[in-house]
Amino acid sequence: MATPRRSKRSSGSALPQRAKNPNGIRLWPFAALLLIAGALAYSTSFSGGFMGDDADAIANNPNIKSLWPLRSAMTAPNDTTLAGRPVASLTFALNYALAPYDVRNVMAPDPAMGDTLFLANVWGYHAFNLGVHLLAGLALFGVLRRTLMSPPLRDRFGRLSAPLAFATAIIWIVHPLQTESVTFLVQRVESLMGLFLLTALYCAIRAAESDFRESRWTIGAIAACALGMGTKEAMVVAPLIVALWIWVCRPDLKLIGPPRVLLAGLALTWLIPAWLVMTISSRSLSAGFGLGDWTWWLYLRTQAEVIVHYLRLAFWPHPLVFHYGWLPAPSWSSALPELLLLGSLGIASAIALAKRRPIGFAGAWFFLILAPSSSILPIPSEVAAEHRMYLPLAAVIALTVVGLCAAARRFAGGDPPAASATAWARAGWVAVSVLVLVFGWQTLNRNRVYANAQTMTADVVKSRPQNAQAQLAHAIDLIGARSFTEAESHLREAISHPLPPGTDPVVPATMRMDLGLVLCTLSRFPECVDALKQAITIDPRLDAAFNMLGDAELSLRQPREALEAFGQASALTPNNPMPFTRMAWILATSSNAAIRDGAKAVQYAEQAVSQTKSGDVSALDALGAAYAEAGRYDDAREALQRAIALVDREPGNPFGPVLRDHLNLIEGRRPIRTAEW
């Protein structure tokens, strides 16, 4: 009788079983429900416009407009979210290439045509983002199910691995805290990196299940890790996470044993971000020590407050904020409760990890993924950002779901009888269903806030009224809508709140300049002058404020002060014809003889006309007045006739009668005078 051949798999030490479907549970219904729930929750995201850095990284990025040369398609303008992230950049170039030809360049709604063409273009970008998120949800389901089937957890949770993984994944997919990573288009860098990290871990788990004998899974893990490294720098934690999973969930293996090829390959992918950082100086102002007066210790204690806030949002996701404008923690004592909480969780995770307990891996997942951007490396432009919780949220939800399941079993005294188990299962599914419905509804509504910049700024100031920069942005939107009284209220609110350390002086100066603009529009000129002078004191380079100040001083019948203001503006921007035109007009037409100076008026007016190539009506009108003041009436007549010719090309232009009145004065050899000043 022949001796049966022993397979390679059965030889040597016993290997852990592959993660099979306990009780023959089919997995495709779970996958289908995950896709359906995610699609429904984000069905309102397709009308979202460009937010924040979307404009520079996508709409105004010439590199996305061609897939070849590939090097160009994988680069982006400096100091944008896509800079130095070639894989993410390439996906946006693919979006552009796949968009319908007649809409791919429509990067903003047309006031005359509506937003139909714009939405037809932006639809593809949103569809890509949603597809990435749904695939990440499926990968998370696979990772969780196989983790719960690993040796340390199989006996307790193996039979429930698919339901528990599904409950975690579906809550994660529809959770409203994820909207910034999905609906904010440029934050595809976060969700895409998350997909690659989950894929790398899933492939590593499959490789471990085969005792690292199926090379396809090892290759897949390394490839996914490499792509993630080219997507976002936070991917550098992926090799550590894979190593920790093996340490915790495969205690029968030594890291220097069978996993060595996988871990060595993953470690080699660290060369990718290292090369990108060394060769591409792409986001010079986004992170680093000492940027904007942020020190590592100031940033660290501030991040303690921020991370605890993230944890609260994981359980109670309201209010969500697009731009926090988070101020630094004033002292160590002010952040002490948060530091103690996070320190306790970190120590507990480290101890559990040392003892190879799976809860330690969940803690490590949370802290490691947040570490690159939420520890000691200051990111002054974005101290708090909800998209950073994209992957860490999975650990919070998984611990909650699995923890509640374990608590229920303990409360029931171990494995409950069949009838009791059915009741507990029904209660669990009801709880998950309610949570998914509530979170899904919140996500539906949250997506609508991304419709345009105006709805977003209004939402931010409602949730964070102390955010001075958001108040300024909303006020600018209101000025564009000519709601000046409401804009004044928001500008004063902006001025009353502190700004984060190292904020560019142009921001507080702009607040006061825009307040001056609003006050001038409301004919409150003394207040307008005060606001503009405050703006200039903060930032003396603000030429627009000098121009506004000149007009305000004229409205107060103070031509000398107006000339001084316009003179400052012309010195700052010598190629701008506007201040020269205004000075020429004052010097030529003032009713005060001590102010008038025909020679200087001609000099300034000729400069303005030259700069506009005789194409500006106001400059030509000022030139005519200046020539008249200098006694050159024939030249004045010719200048005004050129101005009238320009106006006549635009039927209905209200400036025509004014120019003809000026021409009548010139033909009567009389200078132009204004009674106002």
Image (cartoon, helix red, strand yellow):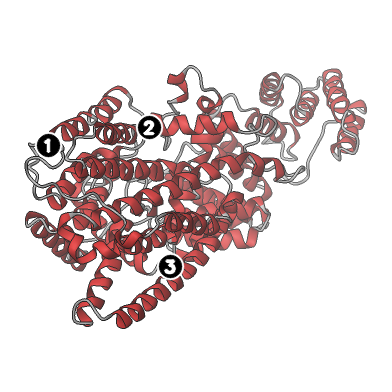
Give SS at disc 1: loop
Give SS at disc 3: loop
Give SS at disc 2: loop
Mark 2, residue position: 85
Q: What residue type is labelled 3?
A: His
Q: What residue type is labelled 1?
A: Ala
- Residue drawn at 80 percent across, 22 percent down: 631
Q: What residue type is labelled 2?
A: Arg
Ranked by sequence position, the earlier of labels 3 and 2 is 2
Mark 1, residue position: 2
Mark 3, residue position: 318
Q: Distance between the residues labelled 1 and 3?
A: 70 Å
Q: Quadrant of the N terminus?
A: top left
Percent position of residue 77, x then y: 45, 28
Asked whether residue 505 is in view, the answer is yes
In the displayed structure, 53 sits above or below 525; it is above
Ranked by sequence position, the earlier of labels 1 and 2 is 1
Task: Tell us which disc is closer to us: 1 or 2.
Answer: 1
Q: Which residue is nearer to you in this view: 380 or 277?
A: 277
